[in-house]
Structures are given as structure tokens and as C-alpha cells.
Amino acid sequence: MISRAVLSDWVVDARRRTFELVSDLDDSQLLGPRLAIVNPLLWEIGHVAWFQEKWVLRHALGEPPIRRDADALWDSAAVAHDTRWDLPLPTRAGTLSYLTEVRDRVLDRLAHGGDDPRLLYFALHAAFHEDMHDEAFTYTRQTHGYPPPRLSGPRPVAAPGPLRGDAEVAGGTLLLGATPDEPFVFDNEKWAHPVAVGAFAMARAPVTQEEFAAFVDDGGYGRRDVWSEQGWTWREGAGAGQPVYWRRDGGAWERRDFDRWVRLEPHRPVLHVNWHEAQAYCRWARRRLPTEAEWEAAAALDPLAGRKRRFPWGDDTPPDGRPQLDAGVLGCADVSAHPEGDTPAGFRQMIGNVWEWTQDAFAPYPGFVPDAYKEYSEPWFFTHKVLRGGCWVTRGRLLRNTWRNFYPPDRRDVWAGFRTCALE
Ligand SMILES: [Fe+2]
């Protein structure tokens, strides 16, 4: 288990990041337009504190609620999404004071509560829940065209160029999923089970903006033959002719980066493309998406040692700032950055930089049982697709090779791209 000292640092750090992501926004920005893909930020920051209070203070420790109205305001399983703009939410000051109050009580219980495993488990779960919402706050700012967030200590983006070519995976039997020696796992990672993976070749790097522009410029969005039936229906409904944040300026493509337009960065991964767009690109390029098991095999399987690595580069957590994570840098790096994070076979950036769509629907592993927070995984099985690897803004403390993310196949607003495999 994570020590109480480290856990307390994470609780402080997660809340600091939450504050940083909203502190420069005015009251109307904190509500924002009513969209199905985002929450009003004023509501969502309250929800983060409510979740922490509900599971750590009330559920694990049996304490009475701080606010009598908290469940009616912030329980995401009970409060319908499109009503969240109409709730009698506390003011900004009232909401921030609730965030501070809950955090301080949790820190106090961690300092004085001994090593109660329920306290530690739920305090960690709530910190990770906050980390995931912090990622959502970041893409919400992109969705609305708000300025880039002002985060502590950003460094320049590394820009060393392209990274072309495939590397090969011999295949074999992969134990897909997490093992019980992990200090914390989500229900959807339980438990490791054998899956046969055939030999395959996969790109060393994610698909770049330059590569995706070649697909767009070749009329890819209008070529019915490269889209699945479901994908074509989505494309027509959305009127999509290029990635959602792209526009033409004369002959050159630009993309919107928060509140400003920039020229494409040719060697950075393509971002904000959905699963249908990724599939269409693959068909056009005569490639395919990796399966989830293939992705995990490439990241984790060490055929020489006959075991799995925790991370692409090995078993140890890397020093800060090596993979493109934690929004230590604002935005993606070029796909050849961070060679120190390579797998032994030469796959780069499998953790960090950009989430990667896989072929597979999000599905339970054999013997799945939901954890105490029942709404985390189970409601989303089979309708969502699996993404792996984390993006530039994902907190590194969350991630491992077995970590599964999941979004509906039509979501273009999240920090997602993809890498491709060779056809057999
Ligand atoms: Fe949540």
C-alpha cells in the first residue's frame, strides 16, 4: 500500500491541480455552455470534493455529512447530466470552501487515523478520481476554447522530430490484466488471465499530425470505402471533413490549441480524433488498430524474462518529466521524444503523450466483480472502446501497463490519438 505520507502529498497535490485548473475562469466560464460531453466546471469541482467526502469520511469512517444537500447536488449517478446547469449550486466561494474543508478533514484523518486499510484505500481512490476529473477539466477548457491552464512549472515541449517504422512482437501467452501484488487496481483490471497473442508488427510511435493530414488531403473523410457503416453514419451526422479542431488557412492546416490557432506540428501525434476516424485512417493506410491484448503485450511482455513489466521501460516509476505526463509540459511532444521510455523492442511513448485507441470494446475480464464504487466500470461495458497509455496531462501516479481507459467511439474532445499495426 502507498504510505500515509505519500498519500497525503497526493491529496494536497490533486486539490492544488484542481484549483489551478479553474482559478483564472470567471463565473460564466465556470458554468459554460450546456453540452452532453462536458460538465459545468463549478458543478464538477464540487463533485470531486463530494466524492472524497462520501467515500473517505462518510463511507470508510462513518462520519456525518458536512452539507445536508451534498448528495442532491453532486452525486453523478443520481443527478441527470443535463440538469447540472440548473442546480442550486453554492457560489464559487462556497464551493471552493467545501473543497478546502473536505481536503483538510481527509488530511487530518490521514495524519491521526493510523493505518486503517479502508481509510487508505478510499483516500487513494478519491485522489485518483480527482486526477481523472482534472484531466477532464483540461479537455473541457480545450472544448470551450478557454485559455490554456496556468499550471505550476511547465517546461518547453521536446521537439526532436519523427519516428518511423514498426517493431515486432513475437507473440505468445499474455497474462492480460493486473496481478494482486499491485498496491491499487481498479475493478476493470482484475485479474490477469491468459490470452493468446499472435506475432504482430506495430508502429514504434503514434500516428502524427502530418500522417493524418495526408489522409485528410487524400479525401479520406469522403471515401465511403474506408469507413465502417457505423463510422460513416457518425461522419455524416457530425458533418466531419477533418479533425474537429482543424481548419484551413489558405493552403495550410491549422489546429485550435485552447484559445489560439497554430500551424500543425507535423511530428506531434494527431489528437482529438475518435475511434471511427482512427479506424478510417487505418483502412486508408492499409493498417489496423492494435487489440487491447496486443497493446499490453507490446508494452509489458518481456519474452526473455518470461514476465510482464509494470511500465514500458521496466518496473520502476520514472523520475518526473521523463514520459510526457502530468502536464509538466503543456501539450504533446514530438513522437520521437523520450527515448528513455522505450520498451526493449523499441516502442516509444506507450505511456504518456497521447491516449491510444485500441480495436476493442471495453469489456469485463473473466470473473469481473464491481468494486465499492459500482458506477466506475460496469455501466460502460460494451458501449465504450478501450484506450491505453495516458496522455500529456494524465497524472503519472495513475498509470501502469495494465491501466484501461474507455470512451464512446464518437468522442473527439478527449486527448486521444492512436498507433497502428501492420496487416498480416
Ligand atoms: Fe466522478
Image (cartoon, rainbow, N blue to C red):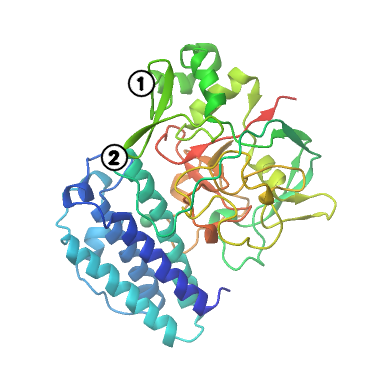
Q: Disc 2 marks which amino acid?
A: His
Where 253 falls versus 1 (above or below)? above
| Lower sequence index among marks 2 and 1 | 2
Residue 68 position in % (x across, y down): 20, 70
Residue occupying image coordinates x 42% and y 70%: 11
Asked where in the image residue 43 lies, by quadrant, the reply is bottom left
Question: Which quarter of the rendering shows the N terminus?
Answer: bottom right
Q: Residue tagged by mark 2? A: 144
Where 93 falls versus 274 (above or below)? below
98 or 72: nearer the viewer: 98
Q: Is residue 241 visible?
A: yes
- Mark linked to residue 237: 1
Q: Is residue 1 shown left or right of residue 143?
A: right
Q: Disc 1 marks which amino acid?
A: Gly
Which quadrant does ligand 1 occupy?
bottom left
Q: Residues within 10 Å of mark 2 (few under 14, many from 20)?
A: some
Residue 356 position in % (x across, y down): 56, 39
